[in-house]
Amino acid sequence: MLGEIGRKRLMMRLPHLRDSIASASSDCMIELFCSYELAVNMRDALVLGGGRPDLADEYRQICLELEEEVEVVLCATALAVRRDGT
């Protein structure tokens, strides 16, 4: 469940990878989806709570880094598939 919500969020944030995100099923990707959802939830709670702007900024950065990681993993996977011809 958590992973699927994270997947949907990433599909909105990275529309150019929407199809790849939708079809990703490896354990690595599911873990990234879950991590992203947890980070977004914490970021949003910190922003709404207003008590720790430094921590909210840290979670914003974590969200961006996870988005980049998803992009790198998906691109690497696509290149490997092309190279193998499968």
Image (cartoon, grey):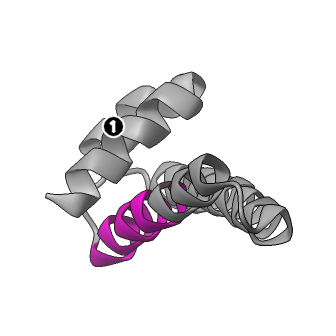
Residue 19 left/right relative to 12: left
Residue 30, given in percent of the width and then of the height, sits at 30, 67
Q: Nearer the viewer, residue 29 or 44?
A: 44
Residue 76 in view: no
Q: Which residue is painted at 62% across and 60% down in the image?
A: 46
Q: Which residue is painted at 33% across and 37% down in the image?
A: 8
In the image, residue 22 sits, relative to residue 26, either above or below, namely above
Residue 26, given in percent of the width and then of the height, sits at 28, 69
In the image, residue 65 sits, relative to residue 28, either above or below, namely above
Instruction: Tell me where residue 58 sits by quadrant.
Output: bottom right
- Residue linked to disc 1: 8
Q: Which residue is painted at 27% across and 47% down in the image?
A: 5
Q: Nearer the viewer, residue 72 or 43?
A: 43
Question: What kind of residue is marked 1?
Answer: Lys
Residue 25 left/right relative to 39: left
Q: Of helix, strand and loop, which one carries label 1?
A: helix
The residues colored magenta run 27-40
Q: Nearer the viewer, residue 20 or 3?
A: 3
Is residue 39 found inside the magenta-colored segment of the image?
A: yes
Instruction: Tell me where residue 54 sits by quadrant.
Output: bottom right
Q: Quadrant of the N terminus?
A: bottom left
